[in-house]
Amino acid sequence: MSKNLVIVESPAKAKTIEKFLGKDFKVMSCNGHVRDLHPNELSIDLKKNFEPKYFLLKEKTKLINDLKKAASGSETIWLATDEDREGEAISWHLTEVLNLQEDKTKRIVFHEITKNAILHAIENPRYLDYNLVNAQQARRVIDRLVGYQVSPILWKKVKPSLSAGRVQSVAVRLIVEREREINSFTPSMFVKVYADFESVSDKTIRFRAEVPEKIDDLKLAEKFLKECIPSKFTVESVEKKPGKKSPPPPFTTSTLQQEASRKLGFSVSQTMQLAQKLYEAGHITYMRTDSVRLSDMAIGVAKEVITEQFGKEYSHPRNFQTKSKGAQEAHEAIRPTFLNVKSLDAGAQEKKLYELIWKRTIASQMSDARIEKTTVKINVSESKRQFVANGEVLLFDGFLKLYVESEDDENPENGTAVLPALKTGENLIMIEALAVERYTKPPVRYNEAMLVKKLEELGIGRPSTYAPTISTIMKREYVIKGNVKGKERTYHELVLKDKTIREEKKSEMYGFEKGKLLPSPVGVMVNDFLVEHFKNIMDYHFTANIEDEFDKIAEGSLEWRKMIELFYKDFTPVVETASKVLFKSSFERLIGVDPATGKKVYAKSGKYGPYVQLGESNDKEKAKNAPLKKGQLPESISLEEALELFKIPRVLGEYEGKPVTVNIGRFGPYLEYNAKNISLPRKYDPYSVEFNDAIQVILSKQDNESEPKSLTFMHEGEEMKILRGRFGPYISFKKKNYKIPRGKDYRSLTLAECLQIINEAVEKQKTSSEK
């Protein structure tokens, strides 16, 4: 046995660290959490001061036995889990499960996996930080109380199999409210006027100017263009201002997620998985951080790299201050461990993410870009309106030589032009002028990066929670990631050229959005119920305040059980009230009128989800209903989309003299044939499935039904049955079930083969329990 046992969280990290330590050290991995609250019970003793009841994870039984054996033969156990609250909690759980003695146990932390960092950590061990442990416990307990007590109410009041979460439900609320903002938005039309000019003295450069104010309608714009025809155009003023652009700070968890989404198209969870690999391989510092600070060593190395690659004038060493609300565990920003390594010999995605981190880190230590901003005001002799041209000249590129930060859809970059050298009083020639109808734009939908940014701004969640929160709401299908179809509209444009004004009618596509987060109908229903009956849980400020209290626990200024007690005191009566209410989604919206029948078309929400209705509910002729497709919302579905849904049921054709019809019911799409309903597999769309595919589904169903439902043997005076279940064929004997291995044809099994399968399963179970 080795004198020293080092326990880390992941096997990849273990391999990297083992290279740096000598033969007296053995490095093992615990593979993350080893204990947790039980998944099928509350696991919190409400009568004993909210004592959590932890259970050893079943899949960790063998691992814990191996760690116990290694720990018993070691002089010192080094707990080297991650440096955040989760990592501290994992170390604490390990001390409890392994029964580690305090005098034999040391806690070490490091924010990069390099030899110097590991050896420095070994030389500077500490004890477990119980404030961090308790902050993690408080989060886990409150999240369990919310999820475990609110979810059953959702099952009863809204729909079975739903769940609620303290942070995930607030994230869904943001997306639902943004969708409603967009649906209630009424665009207003305005007119923008542009003109292309050139100088009388220098006709080599053309430039564009615009009327800075919006014009209300095309008639007023036409009046102005008529005033331009006899006018002279003179430069009233040329204003030049020096300016600068400073580099963005190094990456935090959230800014890395945002920029990787915008520049590389990575999802938030994908970014974190890749960053984890880079960290564990020793290529970058710890990837869960709020800090934008760099170490003095990193700043020094960056200066050397910049001076060597770009020149002295491009170097500007600086350190940034962390400003994010509730910043925690702020050690260092995310940066390459070795800044002189520009690129990696790694997988394509890891390589791209590493290079993005390298560029951002180096750019943060580069000089500001120097620019000169020019504003030219142009008088129109026969009008009170003016044209204004804005130009920008890059005098020194600075950090822009290496890196340009991307922006969200919410903040489109305003383009600027290079202007010719103009003087006050100079005469200009108007080449052409345009008056174009434009429309105000609704708020844009969130993508993953924008949602992370919003959560961070509100102080909701922390670096470790953004990715799992988004994954959870998408996995549970409260939110769907998809594209929004664009729509076509016409607009008018006036063109002034050669002293003549002509009107042109044009069309444009608008509203297209790619890779956005859209609320599902179920997500909307859950949100509405929670907002109505759990106002505190769904309140942005309340959720942010809870995060602040977790931070206070981590700092040691708040007792964690007291915090939970106060939370639960207010939470309990809300749960009791909500469990007694009758919730009914009463959404109803008139979409339009069906041109074929003259009947009104409605979008509604019912017991089994949202649907569209053709006709009135109280008409003599029964109204026709059709469920919405995945991704469609009753609040935004168009008349055209709604009418498409009424094409179900569809008669696909006849097979052996009987009609084949596709329909959608309570449990999803199905085929109707020969007085039987046959579920339509997920890979087929009921609106486009073809006749031949439907026949294959029917024949497959008939083949399955022709097989025997079960095979029966007698053994030891009891029945042994071979049955076909939901997850495949299995053997049922003496009130126990045994899975039949893949590759074995259950229809031809003998009694002896069945007994062999049972005996092997029993032996395997015995071996597992002994370990």
Image (cartoon, rainbow, N blue to C red):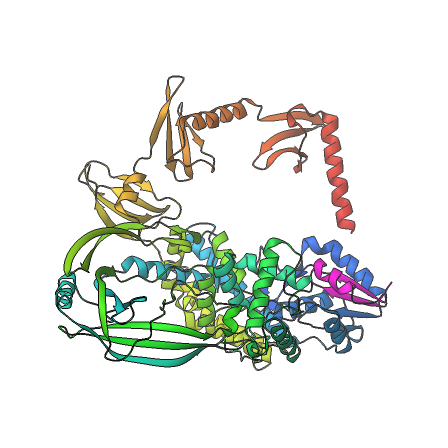
Residue 271 position, x and y percent, is 56, 59
Residue furthest right in the image = 1
553 versus 28 height, above or below: below
Residue furthest front in the image = 201
Residue at the image point whose x is 43% and y is 52% from the top: 480
Q: Quadrant of residue 193?
A: bottom left
Q: Is residue 46 visible?
A: no
Residue 598 position, x and y percent, is 17, 40
Classify residue 193 as left or right of residue 443.
Answer: left
746 versus 486 height, above or below: above
Classify residue 69 as left or right of residue 156.
Answer: right
- The residue lying toward the viewer, choosing from 733 and 154, is 154
Residue 731 covered by magenta stretch: no
- The residue lying toward the viewer, choosing from 652 and 414, is 414
Residue 458 position, x and y percent, is 44, 71
- The residue lying toward the viewer, choosing from 185 and 485, is 485
Residues in magenta, as a range: 1-30
